[in-house]
Image (spheres, rainbow, N blue to C red):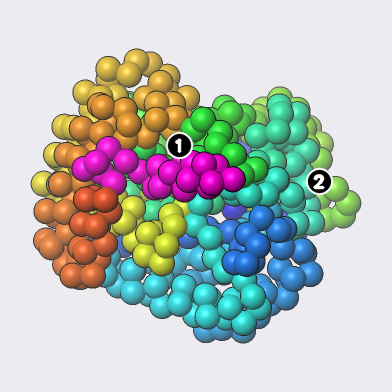
Amino acid sequence: MPATSHHMGTSEPITETTAEDHIQGICFKTGPPRHIGVELEWFLHDPHDPARPVGPARLTAAVDGLRTLFLRSRLTSEPGGQLELSSLPATSLTACVNAAAADLDSVRHRLRQDGLALAGHGHDPWRRPRRLLDEPRYAAMETYFDRSGPAGRSMMCSTASVQVCLDSGTAEPGPFGLGRRWLLAHLLGAVLVAAFANSPLSGGRPTGWKSTRQAVWAALDPGRTLAPETTGPDPRAAWTAYALDAPVLCIRGDEGPWTVPEGLTFRQWIRSGVHRPPTTADLDYHLSTLFPPVRPRGYLELRMIDAQSGRDGWIVPLAVATALFDDAAASEIAYRAVKPLADAAGPGPAPRNPLWRRAARHALADPELHATAVTCFAAAREALPRLGASDAVQAVVADFTERFVLRGRCPADDLLDAFQRKESHS
């Protein structure tokens, strides 16, 4: 959630028709899948005392030091001090991995000089939510989400993810068609949640969820976090309606706190002009405040995967998702595997669909999710050589598959095992 400039400029008020055209023009760019990207979020912690909060001054100094590095990725901070690295689009999986890995090596080396380290967890396992960034965007977001409970602060300050970015697909039907990839992203989402669940702890204790991060997101304002219509013939129309009918999080201003309206959709704002007429810049900002599990930004941003532990853990969801979307044979296998599972789960949009709840709570201990994940990971592994993946990338995927997927486990299970060992010796 990188911050966006709030200067209002001299833009003219936007009409409803112009807004619809604008959304459809910028959110889905069509063409053969060629580009891959990844956004990696991390917690910063003191490796000698992970539960101790990193103070704002120490955090600021560390981030300022990172900004002196030559990085290919864009470096930003999240409200709770999480660090985010957003890669440039790459034309191959191996190129994406190599560029992001090189940046991470530089970041880790620099952080060690400040006595800090990166931690990959979907939800902060040690510390309570605490907003460190004092910016109008995040103050408004906090006000907005506080109206419906504590989940908003937890989402802002205590969650982190691996977000895989893939091209939207072609305008024509087929395995790489926009409609098929849009549907597959939502069908496959629960399997990705389950396989990569890595957030079973909060405040140092088990929460009862393998992916606490996903449970937090499912508890948020449904108007901006549930999935839009995914089975219709035109994803553009579905997303446009979703975006215009989503609640306005805030109305920006050049001075003072931003206005946080209640129950005002963007469509209603256009029609009423309440507070002030919205502009195209306001619409672009509004789109950045929508957080469904799959977000179209000219490409498809898969937002449902927990941040991963270890030096190379993040490579696995990037490689698996890329293989299942960008290799035609693997994509077909994945679609055939997940479609019956999603259909049997019953109605309801992600992430509140029963299948997604099972994925977040039980992960691959759920027999049906386990069987589907085994099929999908096998297809991905077969596809990786066809996509030119390096031996190193194939090796980390194989290791994860054998260590977790084939055994019906996920990274959260290792964390829970470590917690139980600690409890038994205390």
Q: Where is residue 218 drawn, in percent x and y?
A: 53, 30
The three-letter amino acid code for the residue at tag 2 is: Trp
Residue, disc 2? 258
Q: Where is residue 264 drawn, in percent x and y?
A: 70, 28
Residue, disc 1? 210
Is the residue marked by circle 1 packed among few (<14), some (14-19), or many (20+) residues within 10 Å? many
Is the residue 171 above or below the residue 274 in the image? below
Q: Residue at the spot x=33%, y=74% of the render?
A: 98
Tell me, for residue 223, which label it has, or none. Answer: none
Is the magenta region chiefly helix, strand or loop? helix
Asked whether, in this view, residue 154 is left or right of residue 217, the answer is right
Q: Earlier in the sequence, mark 2 or mark 1?
A: 1
Q: Nearer the viewer, residue 14 or 34?
A: 34
Q: Which residues are magenta?
A: 404-426
Q: Nearer the viewer, residue 316 or 297?
A: 316
Q: Nearer the viewer, residue 337 or 276?
A: 337
* Tag 2 near tag 1, CB within 8 Å: no
Q: Residue at the spot x=53%, y=60% of the render?
A: 119
* Residue at mark 2 to residue at mark 1: CA–CA distance: 36 Å
Element assignment for label 2 = loop
The three-letter amino acid code for the residue at tag 1 is: Lys
Element assignment for label 1 = loop
Q: Residue at the spot x=59%, y=39% of the render?
A: 205
